[in-house]
């Protein structure tokens, strides 16, 4: 089968992360075996996310998150059809339309491939009435937003609390705005002026244009500062400064959490696969609470173009690869 990989070997086969990162390659690899509790999915759509650029850049190895190896599979978000189920899997059967999350950094092949094998607990029924390319944008970013909101909830944010969402027009930020509003939080969305109408339509109660003096602008809307922040744009200390003392702060980038000044409770959030919760999020997409956005669709062989578009910035929604 074909699988998109980031290759880290030189012409002599030596392994290294290299200054310029890896090379993107569609490799011919064996179809993965299905073990107990797992299922194999024939991939129909796989979204490209910042984590794919992170892996291709060699950052997980450079940052000590994983050990070096000749190549890493790419792709976390999957929509497709169950091909085979392993021993012990009763919740799914061949032919089921599903979505799922591949949540490991150190896989030989990922979601951007003809087939992917996942734990059955990482998979959910696909939302009905939503195109497969759009469904493929849900798992990673809707789960991350939801899990970050759970973390903020455990730190005291409840219905009526104000939540700052930076990068609110992005894939993660957009789902965070929608899910936070659905939980009854009053969202202060930070995005570019051109995105104001869209983030307000997603449920933001307040809008702050990105730029200088974020904390002053937020405090003018919410005296004392927001109760919490979900920092999808990695504004770090600038976003923390807009949160009230003893508030809550969710950082979603490894190593980018700000110092917890003024008693603010800062937490790193790293997504984990959760098929049961993903099923609930799929229902929210069916009900129109969540809005999957597709920037464009490309064949697997044109993954480099999707990476280039992502690197340029300004992408709204996700580029989606179809094998
Ligand atoms: N921890 C986890 O498990 C996890 C999971 C998913 C994502 N993430 C991380 O979350 C971050 C967001 O991911 P994403 O997929 O949502 O990326 P995305 O779709 O590219 O969204 C990022 C958004 O932030 C905006 N932005 C950039 N600088 C800004 C600023 N100064 N003020 C306000 N907005 C700004 C971008 O606008 P422009 O495009 O116009 O610059 C874009 O709309 C990434 O760093 C990703 O790695 C972490």
Image (tube, rainbow, N blue to C red):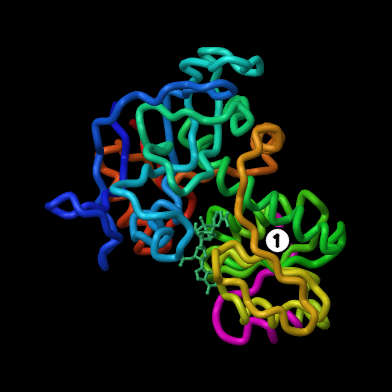
* Disc 1 Cβ-to-ligand 1 distance below 8 Å: no
Residue 141 lies, with reference to residue 92, above or below; the image says below
x and y percentages locating residue 306 in the rendered image: 33, 49
Quadrant in the picture for the N terminus? top left
Q: Residue furthest left?
A: 11
Residue 286 in the image: x percent, y percent? 66, 32
Q: Is residue 188 above or below residue 6?
A: below
Q: Nearer the viewer, residue 257 or 70?
A: 70
Residue 89 picture quarter: top right
Identify the image quadrant of the C terminus. top left
State the image coordinates of residue 192 (x, y, percent, origin top left).
53, 70
Rendered location of residue 211, percent (x, y): 55, 80
**How many neighbours does mark 1 have within 10 angstroms: few (below 14), some (14-19), or many (20 or more)?**
many
Residue 289 image-quadrant placement:
top right
**21 to the left or right of 221:** left
> Is 211 colored magenta in this rendering?
yes
Please say if 158 is above or below 321. below
Instruction: Give the residue displayed 70% in from the left and 32% down from the top.
Output: 276
With 208 as the anchor, is 263 left or right in this view? Answer: right
Mark 1 = which residue?
204
Instruction: Give the residue at x 17% y 55%.
Output: 10
Question: Which of 160/125 is in front?
Answer: 125
Q: Which residues are magenta?
A: 203-219
Q: Could you say whether the residue bearing mark 1 is in a helix, strand or loop? A: loop
Query: Is residue 317 placed above or below 62 in the rendered structure?
Result: above
Please tell me which residue is depicted at 71% across the width and 70% down the height of the picture: 266
Asked if residue 107 is among those painted magenta in the image, a careful observer would answer no
């Amino acid at each position: 089968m074909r699988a998109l990989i980031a290759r880290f070997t030189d012409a002599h086969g030596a392994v290294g992360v290299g200054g310029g990162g890896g090379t993107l390659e569609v490799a011919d690899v064996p179809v993965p075996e299905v073990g107990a509790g797992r299922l194999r999915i024939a991939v129909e759509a796989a979204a490209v996310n910042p984590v794919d650029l992170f892996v291709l850049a060699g950052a997980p190895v450079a940052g000590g998150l994983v050990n070096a190896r000749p190549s890493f599979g790419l792709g976390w978000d999957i929509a497709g059809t169950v091909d085979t189920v392993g021993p012990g899997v009763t919740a799914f059967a061949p032919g089921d339309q599903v979505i799922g999350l591949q949540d490991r950094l150190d896989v030989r092949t990922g979601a951007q491939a003809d087939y992917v094998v996942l734990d059955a607990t990482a998979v959910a029924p696909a939302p009905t009435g939503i195109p497969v390319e759009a469904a493929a944008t849900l798992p990673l970013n809707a789960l991350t937003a939801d899990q970050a909101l759970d973390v903020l909830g455990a730190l005291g944010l409840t219905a009526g609390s104000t939540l700052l969402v930076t990068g609110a027009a992005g894939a993660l930020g957009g789902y965070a705005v929608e899910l936070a509003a659905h939980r009854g939080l009053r969202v202060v969305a930070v995005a570019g002026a051109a995105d104001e109408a869209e983030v307000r339509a997603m449920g933001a109660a307040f809008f702050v244009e990105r730029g200088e003096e974020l904390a002053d602008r937020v405090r003018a809307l919410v005296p004392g500062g927001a109760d919490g922040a979900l920092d999808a744009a990695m504004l770090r200390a600038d976003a923390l400064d807009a949160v009230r003392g003893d508030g809550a702060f969710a950082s979603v980038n490894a190593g980018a959490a700000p110092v917890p000044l003024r008693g603010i409770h800062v937490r790193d959030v790293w997504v984990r696969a959760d098929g049961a919760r993903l099923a609930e999020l799929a229902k929210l997409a069916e009900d129109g609470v969540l809005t999957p956005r597709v920037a464009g669709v490309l064949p697997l062989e044109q993954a480099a173009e999707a990476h280039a578009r992502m690197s340029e910035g300004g992408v709204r929604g996700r580029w989606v690869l179809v094998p």
